[in-house]
């Protein structure tokens, strides 16, 4: 029994192949982190659309500074851009602000206790950004002419 203990003490803690394996795992983790964390941007934000149940109820074009609205949507001009209020039925509403500099942020809503769309959704700053308010069935999406429509079939 004592000889096994002494033999274990004499052997190195890590062998060469152990260190090679750990180095390969570390390289793999770094490569995966860079591949996922540093994804290329979908392009500059050129337009924004607000959809309720897949129907476009508001759209804004940053290039021409024009917008279209449907019923239940109010637009107010501000110093930086526009403040858009979407009425979602029985006293429900969402308010988002469009900054002409190229961003959209949900600023107010009465959708739930935690207001995830206001407190946890980041501002849309590029063409693949999305803000979602599930209780009000409202989705705000960014867009760009750089994004091609997918071909299915």
Image (tube, rainbow, N blue to C red):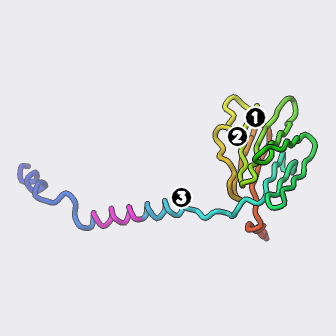
Q: Which mark, by number, is residue 37? A: 3
Q: Which residue is mark 2?
A: 117
Q: Which residue is mark 1?
A: 109
Q: Is 18 located above or below residue 68 in the figure?
A: below
The residue segment tinted magenta is 19-27
Q: Position of residue 110 (x, y in %)?
A: 76, 31
Q: Position of residue 106 (x, y in %)?
A: 72, 42
Disc 1 packing (10 Å; few <14; some 14–19; many ≥20): many
Helix, strand or loop: magenta stretch = helix
Q: For numbered disc 3, what is the local secondary structure?
A: helix
Q: Is 150 inside the magenta-drawn segment?
A: no
Residue drawn 78% across the image and 48% down it: 81
Q: Are marks 1 and 2 in contact (CB under 8 Å)?
A: yes
> Which residue of the protein is positioned furthest toward the left in this rendering?
2
User: Toward the viewer: 34 or 9?
Assistant: 34
Q: How many marks?
A: 3
Residue drawn 76% across the image and 42% down it: 96
Question: Counting residues from the N terminus, which is met first, the one under dot 1 or under dot 2?
Answer: 1
Q: Quadrant of residue 17?
A: bottom left
Question: Counting residues from the N terminus, which is met first, the one under dot 1 or under dot 3?
Answer: 3
Residue drawn 75% across the image and 63% down it: 144
């Amino acid at each position: 029994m004592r000889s096994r203990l002494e033999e274990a003490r004499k052997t190195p803690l890590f062998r060469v192949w152990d260190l090679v394996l750990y180095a390969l795992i570390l390289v793999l983790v770094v490569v995966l982190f860079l591949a996922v964390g540093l994804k290329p941007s979908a392009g500059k934000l050129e337009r924004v659309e607000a959809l309720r149940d897949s129907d476009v109820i508001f759209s804004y074009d940053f290039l021409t500074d024009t917008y279209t609205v449907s019923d239940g949507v109010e637009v107010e001009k501000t110093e930086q851009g526009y403040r858009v209020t979407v009425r979602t039925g029985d006293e429900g509403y969402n308010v988002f602000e469009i900054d002409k500099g190229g961003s959209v942020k949900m600023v107010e809503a009465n959708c739930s206790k935690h207001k995830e769309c206001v407190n946890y959704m980041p501002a849309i700053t590029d063409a693949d950004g999305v803000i979602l308010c599930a209780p009000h069935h409202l989705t705000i999406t960014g867009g760009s002419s750089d994004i091609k429509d997918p071909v299915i079939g």
